Image: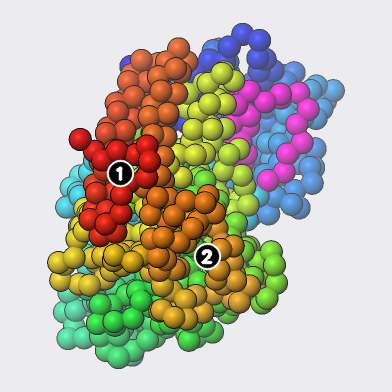
Amino acid sequence: AEDGYDLWQRYRPVEAGYAIPATSIVSEGTTPPLIAAAQELERGLSGLSGKVIEVGTLRDNAVIIGTPSSSAAIALLNPDLTKAGEEGFIIRTTRLNDRPVTIIAANRDIGVLYGVFEYLKLIQTRQPLTSLNITDAPKVKLRVLNHWDNLDGSVERGYAGTTIWDWWKLPDVRHPRYTDYARANASVGINGTVLNNVNSNAVSLSPAYIAKTAALADTFRPYGIKVYLSARFSAPIEEGGLKTADPLDPQVRAWWKAKADEIYAAIPDFGGFLVKANSEGQPGPQDYKRSHADGANMLAEALKPHGGIVMWRAFVYSHEKPDDRHKQAYDEFKALDGQFADNVLVQVKNGAIDFQPREPFHPMFGAMPKTPLMMEFQITKEYLGFSTHLAYLGQYYEEALKADTFAGGKAGNTVAKVVEGAVDNHTLTGIAGVANIGMDRNWSGSDFDQANWYAFGRLAWNPQASSRAIADDWARMTFSNDPAFVAPVVDMMMTSRETVADYMTPLGLHHLMDTGHHYGPGPWVDNLERADWNPVYYHKADINGIGFDRMKTGSNAIAQYTPKAAKLWAEPKTMDERYLLWFHHVPWDYKVKSGRTLWDEVVVTYSKGASDVTTMRNRWASLKPYVDADRFEAVATNLMIQEREARWWRDASVAYFQSISKRPLPAGYSAPE
Ligand code: GCW
């Protein structure tokens, strides 16, 4: 049965009519990454061609893989690898000893593995193989998953079952699933993984857990994946028995240095630490009246001799500050630009609130030229319907990455270019994605959520890639290459996130999900202990209007953007109305671009979102002939749930807002029965 376990690496036989010329694999490499590369190529080519294609001798149409130092054949052919860099590769059809061959070559072993995955993708997406000349290399250095996995097995905001890390049985038991995890990640170029939740437990830094972490690191190493840990800032107290975790205290600094030395003794290529500090109740340097830079630099100093890095999160907000939550991270961090050690990256969520279905880009991007800023996307769909609602996030990520920061007053300095380091000349660069992986057979909780993991990796490799092209590859590799399937599915994926925004948070509304779990509507919630957790704080609806005024007349968060970026949102009349209520408090009777009143537009957009899910559901039903029965049914069931819940969102939201606006529903829209 098709249970989705194979992800986009199914390697099922191609249909007659598509030719795979490869006859044998030539690989002389003996290092673990080169062995992994040869094994993957054997597995992929054999599966896809339906015949055994093994590592063997040179024949016509052999595929030769390796680096100039591991392969005499590659050395002899001496291909130009200057553009392949540290992790990139080339794929080329050429001739050797008068035989036609394909070479997959790189400067380093890991590039060969990446090249193998690219070559297999060409077959999986039915590209011609006869005259290849490909050079590719990642544009971002650290391409990292963040697991919000707790040591007790639960996953914070995880909707795909419990953690895949079997902490009890590690370090001795190494499940094959760990290798499959590494293969999947390497296939999209992910080269790092933070194993534990940012809301971390100091036990993850204990000797027993370091040994367990080392076992995972050993398993992932052949695939180019480094492990990292979330570090609890108060660990010197909890694990070390010290009285303080003050970053300027010599004993605290010595404890972290010793801890880093201990970790590197077990894991020589350990990546470093991810830290959530002074955010949502987590300990941090401010507990000792020190700055984020003081905290980050202390850890950076401990990791530096070993080549490790610190990813310090900018997701901070405090309810003690009555000001707009939107402004807090920028306000705290902007002043620290230039104060971070050179092995620190500041990790910033794509938007200033919290992974909402739509957010404008975070104003920190472009505003801290002296600090490498790492993008943090959420792959798990905390605010977009968990794993039952279909929302393709590739399109979401692309929207954030393409946004123009106008840094330095110049057009074209997009978020992607800031993250790539191209705007401010950083070589230490990174993108993180909060993983959607768990023990479900299909890894991600649903078949279509696998696409979000896939798209994250592809965009981390190349932040300027097209999310539509990525969806197209994914649909072909995961389901079918039949154009009658691919075209409608890609169209459906590309509009799916907009649909979710329409039925949950239209026109720039945000954070209206029910409390705590964030599933389903809760725009009426107004009784939480913290004002900034209440949906009413974000929509500010009253009898006259709705929306969060972030202009000068309100919180003035708009001033955190460069003038040219701010200008795009300054005028309700001319702006993209999908951000309208994010920045403006607008009267219900205001006329939007469609000619309707704002009130009518809110109702119409909620309704459109709900009916677009019905359209998706019908579209999927029509694709039954192209999909195996198990996965067809699994997706169909989710779409049934999504349709029901989109209507729930529409009806509950419209009814609630109507109780405030006191306006009639527009003609043709009836109240829910
Ligand atoms: O989105 C919020 C989540 C928390 C999460 C926090 C964060 C890990 O609701 O579950 O905690 O953000 O990103 O730190």
Give the image location of residue 646, x and y in percent.
Answer: 31, 39
Amino acid at pointer 2? Pro
Give the image location of residue 171, x and y in percent.
Answer: 26, 48
Give the image location of residue 198, x and y in percent.
Answer: 30, 63
**For mark 1, what is the residue?**
650
Q: Secondary structure at mark 1?
A: helix
Residue pictured at 46% horizontal, 72% vertical: 346
Q: Is mark 2 within 8 Å of ligand 1?
A: no
In the foreground, 607 or 530: 607
Identify the image quadrant of the C terminus: top left
- Residue 550 in sight: yes
Q: Give the extent of the magenta segment.
A: 112-136
Give the image location of residue 328, x and y in percent.
Answer: 38, 78
Mark 2: few/some/many CA within 10 Å (<14, 14-19, 20+): many
Residue pictured at 37% horizontal, 45% vertical: 666
**For mark 2, what is the residue?**
572
**Is residue 664 rendered magenta in the image?**
no
* Residue 410 as seen in the image, left or right of residue 131: left
Q: Secondary structure at mark 2?
A: loop
**Is residue 117 rendered magenta in the image?**
yes
